[in-house]
Amino acid sequence: MSGGPKTLPRGQSPDVGATIQLLGRPGIHRPGEQSPRPRGRKTWALLALASLSERPVPRRELVRMLFPDASDAPAALRWSLSELRRGLRSDARLDGDPVALDLGGDTVVDAQLLLAGRAGPEVGAEELLAGIDLADCPEFDLWLAHQRERVATALRAALRAEINTRLTARRPAEAVPPARRLVQLAPWEEQNHELLVRVLAATGDRIAAHAAAAACTALFQRELGVRPSPRVALAAALATSGGGTGLREPGPAGGLTLLPDGRRLMARLEVEAGKAALAAGATADGLDRLRSAVAMAGDLGDQRVEGEAQAALGAAMVHAVSLTEPAGVAALRRAAALARAAGDRETAATAGRELAFVALGSRDNAGGALLRAARELAGDDDGKLSAVLGVEAFALTDSGRAGPASAQFRRSVEFAERAGEPRKAAWSLTLLARSELIDGNPEAAREHIDRAMGLVTAERWTAFRPLALAVAAELDLHEGRLDEAGQQLAAAWTAAVRLSDPCWLSVTRRGLGLLAARRGNPAEALQWLDGAYHPATDRPPPICRWMDADTLDAICDVATTFRLPRARAAVAELAALGSQTRMPVYAAKARTYATLLP
């Protein structure tokens, strides 16, 4: 595309050129004139694909996504391109194979501006391609769901930036409208309610601040069955106390000085708020909270509090961003060092266990020693023992020892239930079901994945739901229930896209690939599977190596079943991966596939 996007508010056109509107009801607008509107929902879907895809899109891909059942799909695509050229005129060029959108002069796309962080404060709050849903185009629907979440996330970020700008400029009254809008857009993100309460408190309107806090509490209790964290009520309390943390004393110049205990409380509350946001699926907000907690704890100079915050941030990053995310691993190492210096055995055990998880997931030789140290630090704490046993079982599964792994997972569940930690029980039950499916015991797998799903639902653990759904879907595939598997995978994919979690995206893509293969569509299957797989050249590995091994196993299955030319290379790659990562179960599968090669 030509030129970088300019900063424009919603609905404002440049002096020259067109504004392509994809937010809300799509349209093409020019200053001072009524432009002809291109016809057809799929025409606008095509424009969105061309505008928001990372690279130009091949025509065969557009045909597959937009016209899967058309009798003459290439002709249908040509008609849509012609409609768009008529509407775009000389303001943009849309052509080629792959199809590329070349913006001319001062032409802009509103969604591009928003995603680039260059939209003005009046950017529209409407949904991307509002009113356009193509039920007959499931692949496009999945793409659109992902893009709508991207746009919604960018809009929330733009609103927060606008609020912070107004607050920094000491104009809190101007921050109230965007803060209210932020709550309307994302009412289940507690951070938005807290920000609104703080903004109202900054204006001096204590009644409105308390009313907003009460509305948040009522909403969460009515719709979610839980109360918000203490931070929302604390923000309202600050309105009564005149700002700050409510834990202050007179300063030397008659001002207010924050007491150290108040700062510790705020840092720890920020950690808990970050964990809650992550569990609810608000990954970006959760990570922001934890980074804030680390900064607050660092200013304190308290090794114990900083260690707790660093451990929480590091664990979040290696689970939600990338298994070997350097900043996450560094935070865990820093947490371990701080905890040892402060004599904080609990945090040292947590950081050690997460470092062991990273090492074992990436098949690093250091994993075993780290896990033994974590188990020693866990002592007789049932919750921590449950987590350590779960990681031990996780490693056993991928070493081809499904029987011992299942026994360890069961012990992990017992300790979690004894400790009253249902999320740890759900984690181990899900991976226990996977282990049992690998071991050829689908009846036990069904029992345990059903229990896991019940716990995930009861706990509203959105961040873990995609893996549980993917395991349940694989069991459905094993039992020949393709429609049920498709429903599970559609739900898993929607959640994984919203979370942008590389692990969950990978396992869900793998499931969708297996489903396509079972339905007799090897080309579609390999498209999903190739998107799920990270070659050995990806260093360090972004996801657990067992996930890549599972995906490569599925690629081999599809390639040998449908006698595809790439089968031999895929089998050789699986054999090498199984050997290099010390996962003999996959090396054995490669030998079996080799017997099927022509």
Image (tube, rainbow, N blue to C red):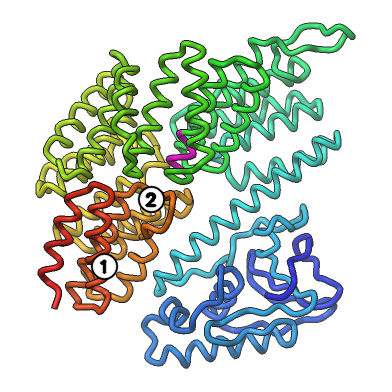
The quadrant of the picture occupied by the N terminus is: bottom right
Helix, strand or loop at mark 1: helix
Would residue 317 be counted in the magenta stretch? Answer: yes
Which residue lies at the image location 61% right of the left edge and 72% below the top edge? 51
Which residue lies at the image location 31% right of the left edge and 43% below the top edge? 363
- Residue nearer the viewer, 356 or 94: 356
Q: Amino acid at mark 1?
A: Ala
> Most prominent secondary structure in the magenta stretch?
helix
Q: Examine the rendered structure and indicate whether residue 98 appears above or below residue 201.
A: below
- Residue nearer the viewer, 349 or 87: 349
Residue 579, can we see it?
yes
Q: Position of residue 142 (x, y in %)?
A: 44, 64
Instruction: Report which residue position mark 2 lands on.
Output: 504
Q: Amino acid at mark 2?
A: Trp
Helix, strand or loop at mark 2: helix
Q: Examine the rendered structure and indicate whether residue 522 appears above or below residue 475.
A: below
Residue at mark 2 to residue at mark 1: CA–CA distance = 23 Å
- The image's mark for residue 570 is 1
Q: Which residues are magenta?
A: 315-320
10 Å crowding of disc 2: few (<14), some (14-19), many (20+): many
Which residue lies at the image location 48% right of the left edge and 17% below the top edge? 339
Q: Quadrant of residue 104?
A: bottom right
Q: Position of residue 475 (x, y in %)?
A: 19, 53
Residue 514, can we see it?
no
Would residue 316 be counted in the magenta stretch? Answer: yes
Which of the marked residues, 2 or 1, is nearer the chain's N terminus?
Answer: 2
Q: Position of residue 580 (x, y in %)?
A: 27, 51
The reply, left or right, for residue 37 in relation to residue 469 is right
